[in-house]
Amino acid sequence: MKELIPLKNLILARQEADLTQEELAKKAKISRSLLSNIERGYAAPSLQTAHRISKALKKPIDSLFFNDNAHKMSKKKTNSA
């Protein structure tokens, strides 16, 4: 069974914006249940959904949806190139 990885960056960004799941979902024009599933790692957002969420939070997509390991790997690749 696949390990579920909550999107901590997304959750923190929503909390820093002082938004409930319901409020962010309305701003992003998605359902609260979809947002909840994305935050908990049960669902992966489509590119369009990720863009809507990032726009609503005024944050870059990669800062919300990629974990720290992905950021580290990306930095290693660009530094070694």
Image (cartoon, grey):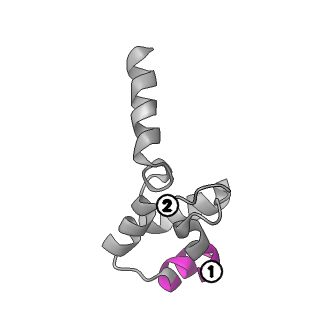
Q: Position of residue 42 (x, y in %)?
A: 63, 66
**Residue 31 in view:** no
Q: Which quadrant of the structure image shows residue 45?
A: bottom right
24 drawn magenta: yes
52 drawn magenta: no
Q: Which residue is most to the top?
A: 81
Q: Which residue appears at 37% of the width and 66% of the height?
A: 13
Q: Position of residue 46 (x, y in %)?
A: 68, 58
Q: Which residue appears at 59% of the width and 81% of the height?
A: 32
Residue 54 disc label: 2
Q: Relative to 45, is 27 above or below?
A: below
Q: Which stretch did the figure color magenta?
A: 22-34
Q: Which residue is most to the front?
A: 1
Q: Earlier in the sequence, mark 2 or mark 1?
A: 1
Q: Which residue appears at 39% of the width and 29% of the height?
A: 75
**Residue 63 in view:** yes
Q: Quadrant of the N terminus?
A: bottom right
- Residue at which label 1 appears: 33
